[in-house]
Amino acid sequence: MSNYVIKHNGVIDSETKNKIIYRYRIITTAVNSDFWDEDIDSKNSLIVGSYGRRTAVDTSDIDVLVILPIEEFDRINNLKGNSQSRLLQVVKNSIIESYPRTNIRADGQVIKVEFSDGIKFEVVPVFKNISGAFIYPDTNDGGTWKSTNPKAEQKAMEELNVKSKGLLIDTCRHMRILRDANFSSYKLSGIVIDSFVCSAIGTWVWCADGETSIYPKGTYESRLLEYFNNNLKYSKTIYAPGSKDSVDLESSKLALEKVLLLMNGK
């Protein structure tokens, strides 16, 4: 059976997508009501992560940023102790009001909202800074603040996907499908896959309908493996598209190599 990249349209069906948007808007409304005094479902939030980058193949991890007023940052940051943990608890309680029977808990950097049908949200309260990036809480090691710029990542990926005529996102989805089917016990994060494909894809594009590639089958997959061997085999980090944030590669490297080898029939 071939493991060459194929097109992956409709991997998450429209009914499920509608459920995700419906629940996302309820979460947004709850936070807006408590923190902005606005009963609005379309402001101050952003779907990020694999789903936001359009590379997700399942609904086990829908990442959502909920943007809070900067005044709340000043208040929280002045509290003694682990103020980041307190912030997660406050936002968690806002969401519980809308979903009192759903499994909701604060965990490290996120508030996990796990629905009985398998759809899982990870909600992160953030504050927007003047650069357009977001500051988010990390409750580990006594509590710290970290930064992320998912909008830059989404924009960079969308532009590169257009240039590749859809090959970029199809490759990212394909690698996730192979990971889940063959190496589910290994860690291989979505941001590592997406960052890798953005770095390795070069000028490769899908052929137009009816056209035939001038390259033999498997050449593209071979080039991806070659890129890994030449550039990342001994690296500990990789850089996210757009934001150029450093991403831990070390913990995902073994599974990434296994997926690439499988794509090459090895």
Image: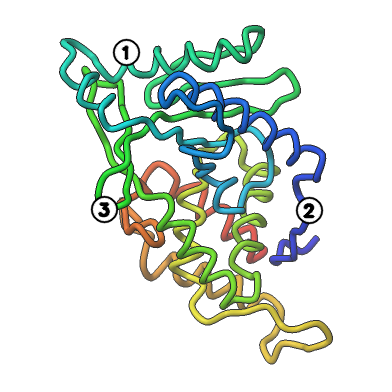
Marks 3 and 1: which is nearer the front?
A: 3
Residue corresponding to mark 1: 86
Q: Around disc 3, counting alpha carbons within 10 Å, would you say few (fewer than 14), some (14 to 19), or many (20 or more)?
A: few
Residue at image position (82%, 39%) is 15
Indicate the position of residue 107 as horizontal and vertical percent values: 43, 19
- The amino acid on which the numbered mark 1 sits, given as a three-letter code, is Arg
Amino acid type assigned to the residue bearing label 2 in the image: Gly
Q: Residue at x 63, y 32 (%)?
A: 60
Residue 31 at x, y percent in the picture: 48, 24
In this view, the mark in front (2 or 1): 1
Q: How many marks?
A: 3
The reply, left or right, for residue 230 in relation to residue 117 is left
Query: Which color scheme does this rendered protein use?
Result: rainbow
Quadrant including the N terminus? bottom right
Residue at label 2?
10
- Mark 2 lies on a secondary structure that is loop
SS for dot 1: helix
| Residue at screen point 68% across, 28% down | 119
Placement of 38 over or under 102, stated as above or below: below
Q: Which mark is residue 155?
A: none
Query: Which quadrant of the structure image shows residue 27?
Result: top right
For label 3, the residue is: 131
